[in-house]
Image (tube, rainbow, N blue to C red):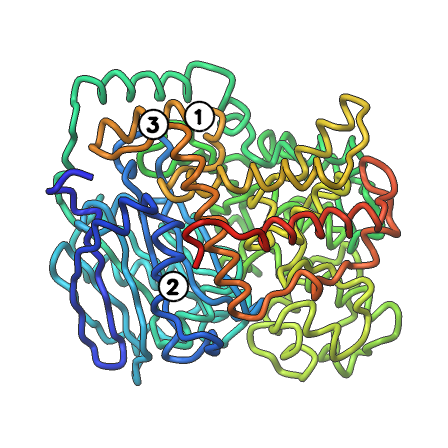
Amino acid sequence: MLPDDPLCRILRVDLSRRTFSVERRPELFDELLGGTGVGVRLLAEGCPAGVDPLAPEAVVVLAVGPLTSHLPLMSKAVALFKSPLTGNLGESHCGGRTAVALRLAGLGAVVITGRSERPLYLAIHGDEVGFRDASALWGARGTGTVGRVIREREPGAGLRSIMRIGRAGERGVRYASVTSETYRHFGRLGLGAVLGSKGLKAITISGKRALPLADFSAYRKLYKETYDMAVETSMMKKYHDLGTAGNVASLDRLSALPAKNLTVRRLDGVAQITGEAFAEGYLGRRLACAHCPVGCVHIAALRQPYAQEAYFYKTSLISYDYELIYALGAMLGVTDPEGALRLMDEVEVLGLDAMSAGVVLAWATEAQQRGLVGTAETDGLALAWGDWQVYLAALDRIVEQPTPFFEALALGVDQAAAQYGGSEFALAFGGNEMPGYHTGPAAHVGFLVGARHSHLCNAGYSLDQKALSEGRTLEPAGLATKLIQEESWRQVLSSLVSCFFARGIYTPELVSRGLACVGCAGDPAKLEQIGEAIYREKYRYKLREGFTFEGLRLPARIFETPSGAGPIDPELVRQTIACVAAFHQEPRAGNG
């Protein structure tokens, strides 16, 4: 790292005392790059073992990496925290301007602890840090209102990032999200609830810090090379054209689209909610994260008439992608595109993670159909597949929690099933609600053993599809090795911090060249070692906080409904988990 690189500066904020300080930790960034690597170390250092995720002592870490603001698609910021949903490692990534704003503010990481007695928002503008009263914003209807007010109050237009929580975060819903720049999110694992528990309504960040380079000539050449790969080859074309919503039709064709709480893997009427259908009927615009030329963020324009007003309409701009269509469309049996968009908009307004919210409501629907709960528990709602109006009302009740049943739903599907029964069809992996891939055993093992129990940990679904196309049968040791290798390399990408869509561009060789341009060492072999070390460090934190491989619950439903690769063998899943567990039990030099 170059001596004048501000990446090694860490801002520490204590909300209880309303104080802040800055420290330099160059050795930490030299060892772990930045982003996820530095974030998990700071989390382990600052978060007391066994702490309640919603206690004042719990810390939140925001971090970026050495290539942020330098190369295309190095556009993500990462948050590390203890998840109130799983009780263990929380990790969430966000695009928009958050990463660039942190870098230009002269920071590599922000560590937040404490709890404010009154609601506030943090205003970080370069070296200035302000604690602003947010009492008037607490309880506001919609995260958009909060962003609009802060934009009017704070400097930094065009450069700043504004992260904020909605009512879900204020009310402690365990899968509340954080919205950044209207259409980007720290979505999974409940960061919104953690910020809400701290009385922190929002964070705005801006700055104008210059970033140093070690070799400008090599940098210009590399920038053009990566830019051209992103915009002039087919590598990123699908993300620009349809975004991840293009997965809907392909997964349905593979009989791998989870629908109606995974009681089926194909959905009648799905043609109305594919990426193609949304693009043809509703696409209003595309957006890109800062320092990204691709424009994968697809925004639908939904025109809705005002009640009792002829020829008066409200046009809502609603972000959609595969995960939202899966969770709020297919999982709920909603094939009306406008109904699905209304649900996506409501999730945005309330500040909920869409995947968890959809899976929770799918479980609740089946629980009511099976007679485990009645309309007394659901506050008069009769949940039914495809009825988006009733799901719209249910989303609001998850946040406001008028009955004990909705209080349970606000804790996540595992907790709700523990109280009301139906664990066999509660679709959670390590406590995190299921992503939208029922491609075969590799996907589900990937969810189970991934450090944050996400499809983005190791992309097991792609191993299923590749094995199916090649006519191969997966076996435990080989599958475990591939999942471990992929997750280890993704630690490098998430420490830089890269968008995972660009993983085909950012090979070990290209990453090494990029690091050399900014004065950081890291040949391909060394990078792979760093990735494995960060992966192991994550698991040391998880094990410290009580995670066990033996405690992983295998949802019975994944074995009952055949996947895209056919029925899933429970023994294959168990043996593969055992192989991953053995990897994390192997002694390694320097592991302590």
Name which quarter of the figure residue 86 lies in.
bottom right
User: Which residue, given by chain and number where applicable, does mark 2 sit on?
Assistant: 43
How far is disc 1 from disc 3 in space, using C-alphas?
9 Å
Left or right of 475 on screen, residue 63: left
Type of residue at label 1? Thr
Residue 339 at least partly seen = no
378 lies above or below 350: below
SS assignment at label 1: loop
SS assignment at label 3: helix
Tag 1 near tag 2, CB within 8 Å: no
Residue under the image location 45 percent in, 64 percent down? 191
User: Which residue, given by chain and number where applicable, does mark 3 sit on?
Assistant: 512
Type of residue at label 2? Leu
How far is disc 1 from disc 2 in space, using C-alphas?
28 Å
Give neighbour class at mark 3: few <14, some 14-19, many 20+ (Cα, 10 Å).
some
User: Which residue, given by chain and number where applicable, does mark 1 sit on?
Assistant: 507
